[in-house]
Image: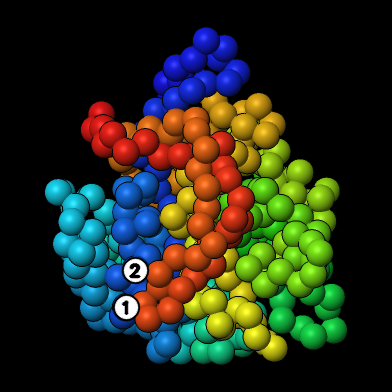
């Protein structure tokens, strides 16, 4: 990573190997057309979450969704009057259910374009009702096939037991699900998605075998006070929910530690404004458009901008067995005001930190390495 400045600790410009987003919700239809370019302008690739309605269950579903993403990107570029289409590769995933077969896993692996299978415990989050009811009871042969062919399991790590406090659901998941799972399948590649706790970070650091974890910008920048600042703040509500400050600090330490198990995954999850501002608002923060500026802000807050490139551009590809991107992305210092809302299909989406200004922005000078 190259930095340019008088004082190395506060560079004016940072040039990174082009980053990837290892956890992204792009949705479908007109929403997809409105959000896809926000990711493609920064990231070379993204792991595309399969929690559509209906979910992406089979290799054929994933192939069709990948085509829709590519078409949407083409259309979005035309509409934006872009001279050239950014090269952006959607890395597809399947949605694990009690009925996913080992054959489907092997076909998906052979396709070369499905890079993970997502575990949503049934009822844990947005569009998870088709998810898994009992992982080790229902999915053993499928997990065995995944382990055998090297297909990563991407885990939403929260228990759904209503008796467990919402803020403890990740920590309890480690004991009740993650540890038994990894004892039963020690060679299975696992990504602990959107980590939110010190317990999760400690687990990932010390665990044996192939494990990684994604970290979102909101969990690195905010604690749970953000949900209640001066009133109820639905645009800071996501799942797993923001935790207390000690957890945020542990996550920031993990992200900036240089440990290759931790990598970038925005969990950008657009919902129309009205779906969040209502009596039962949806979980999900829209972070894609300002993702790299948000991460740079978080890393700079602890004086670790020099570790951003490894987190954003190297650790993820290494875990997934892919080369780093050939291109580059330049971040420059300068006010980056986040608008109150952005167009989203026929509606609008309120981005994370709407109305605030970030100290970093993505440079418009496209540069290829
Ligand atoms: C995601 C969504 O809206 O699809 N929401 C969220 O709060 N993160 C689902 C998920 O990743 O849990
Ligand atoms: Zn997600």
Q: Residue at x 43, y 34 (%)?
A: 331
Give SS at disc 2: helix
| Quadrant housing residue 195 | bottom right
Q: Residues within 10 Å of mark 2 (few under 14, many from 20)?
A: many
Q: Position of residue 163 (x, y in %)?
A: 85, 84
Between 130 and 267, the residue placed more toward the observer is: 267
- Tell me, yes or no, whether the two marked residues, 2 and 1, touch with CB atoms within 8 Å: yes
User: Does residue 165 appear in the picture of this structure?
Assistant: yes
Q: Which mark is residue 34?
A: 2
Q: Determine which residue is flagged by label 1.
A: 30
Of residues 201 and 72, which is closer to you in this image? 72
> Residue at the location (49% across, 30% down)?
333
Residue 79, given in percent of the width and then of the height, sits at 20, 64
- Asked whether the viewer can see residue 191, the reply is no
User: In the drawing, does residue 304 fall left or right of residue 171?
Assistant: left
Measuring 36% from the left and 77% from the top, which residue is drawn there? Answer: 345
* Vertical position of residue 13 compared to residue 277: above or below: above
For residue 18, what is the image quadrant? top left
Q: Is residue 324 above or below residue 5?
A: below
């Amino acid at each position: 990573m190259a930095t340019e400045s008088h004082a190395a600790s506060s560079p004016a410009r940072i040039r990174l190997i082009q980053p990837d987003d290892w956890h992204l919700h792009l949705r479908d239809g007109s929403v997809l057309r409105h959000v896809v370019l926000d990711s493609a302008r920064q990231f070379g690739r993204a792991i595309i979450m399969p929690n559509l309605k209906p979910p992406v269950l089979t290799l054929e579903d994933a192939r069709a969704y990948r085509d829709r993403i590519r078409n949407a990107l083409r259309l979005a570029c035309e509409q934006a009057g872009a001279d050239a289409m950014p090269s952006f590769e959607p890395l597809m995933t399947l949605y694990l259910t009690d009925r996913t077969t080992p054959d489907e896993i092997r076909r998906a692996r052979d396709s070369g374009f499905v890079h993970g299978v997502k575990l949503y415990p049934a009822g844990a989050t947005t569009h998870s009702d088709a998810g898994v009811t009992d992982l080790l009871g229902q999915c053993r042969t499928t997990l065995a096939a995944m382990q055998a062919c090297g297909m990563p399991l991407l885990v939403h790590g929260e228990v759904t037991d209503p008796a467990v406090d919402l803020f403890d659901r990740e920590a309890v998941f480690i004991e009740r699900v993650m540890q038994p799972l990894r004892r039963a399948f020690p060679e299975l590649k696992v990504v602990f998605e959107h980590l939110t706790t010190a317990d999760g970070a400690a687990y990932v650091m010390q665990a044996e075998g192939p494990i990684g974890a994604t970290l979102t910008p909101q969990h690195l920048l905010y604690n749970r006070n953000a949900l209640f600042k001066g009133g109820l703040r639905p645009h800071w509500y996501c799942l797993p929910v923001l935790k207390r400050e000690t957890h945020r600090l542990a996550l920031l330490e993990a992200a900036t530690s240089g440990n290759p198990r931790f990598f970038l995954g925005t969990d950008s999850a657009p919902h129309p404004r009205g779906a969040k501002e209502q009596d039962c608002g949806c979980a999900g923060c829209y972070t894609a458009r300002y993702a790299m500026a948000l991460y740079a802000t978080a890393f700079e807050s602890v004086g670790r901008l020099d570790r951003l490139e490894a987190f954003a551009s190297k650790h993820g590809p290494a875990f997934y067995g892919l080369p780093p991107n050939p291109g580059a992305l330049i971040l420059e210092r300068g006010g980056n005001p986040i608008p109150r809302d952005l167009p989203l299909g026929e509606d609008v989406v309120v981005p994370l930190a709407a109305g605030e200004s970030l100290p970093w922005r993505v440079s418009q000078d496209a540069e290829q390495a």
